[in-house]
Amino acid sequence: MKEEFTFNSEMALVYETNTRISIPTYDALFAMVQSYYRAQLGEKAASLLVIGAGGGNELSAWGPSNPKWTFTGVDTSEEMLKIAKNKTVQLGLESRVKLIQGTIDDLPLPDSKFDAASCILVLHFIDDIQEKLKLLQTIKDNMKPGAPFVLVSAYGDRDDAELRDRLNVWKSFWLDAGKESAKVKELVNKGIMKISFIPENQIERLLAESGFTNITRFYSTGLFAGWICQAE
């Protein structure tokens, strides 16, 4: 058990360090989402669906300060879910967190639908537009009417100079963090440019087609942006 915990701790450190370089306002993002949820949910007990819960950052950001919230986290990565599980233990959240390895299709039939949901840094790993749409539709189908939803994803038109300009800014994040230029180039070619970029208006259309309303972009840093909306 000790060896597994050490491995997960090291993996978590690398993941969280790199994410905070790639998205310098990463921690502020979770604070902003928490404020949005609180404004929508008030003081009542609430169940939250977290898509892409591996790593446990949503759980550690929102769990301790919102004792009436419960969480169902879904992630395809067993190793990342181990990190999330370790965080729930460290923070004493085990009784309020259920973690599921798989996709949203592996959710057990709930007693009731969720009061809120998030999908942070997941959508751009899905290449097919119809699969993106299916994920968003399934999330919406698992939410109560009017429930708040937060989506954060990479976005942009690959053929547009605007995305290339933002990519140059993103490169500077890594260079300023001490990464060698050759390594940053490798990150671009083998990493960031392998993900699925689609324009902002297409993301908003997917949300609307999935049954979300009041769609508003509330966040943007480098290559990534976030939208708030509500399930119909």
Image (tube, helix red, strand yellow):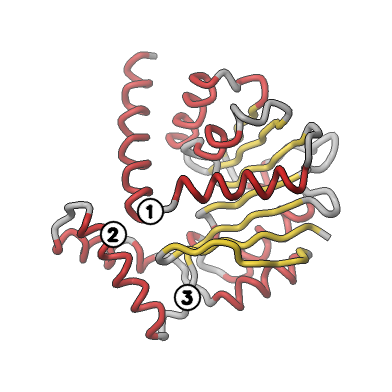
User: Tag 1: residue type?
Assistant: Pro
Indicate the position of residue 1 as horizontal and vertical percent values: 39, 14
Disc ID at residue 156: 3
Q: Residue at x 44, y 62 (%)?
A: 221
Q: Residue at x 52, y 61 (%)?
A: 153
Secondary structure at numbered mark 3? loop
Which residue is disc 2 drawn over? 173
In the picture provided, is 33 more to the left or to the right than 80? Answer: right
Tell me if mark 3 has few (under 14), some (14-19) or many (20+) residues whose alpha carbon lies within 10 angstroms of its own.
Answer: many
Picture quarter with the C terminus? bottom right
Please tell me which of labels 1 and 2 falls first in the chain: 1
Taking 35 as reference, is 173 above or below it? below
In the picture provided, is 135 more to the left or to the right than 2? Answer: right
Which residue is disc 1 drawn over? 24
Please tell me which of labels 3 and 1 falls first in the chain: 1
Distance in Å between CA atoms under marks 2 and 3: 18 Å
Viewer-side residue, 172 vs 78: 172
Secondary structure at numbered mark 2? helix
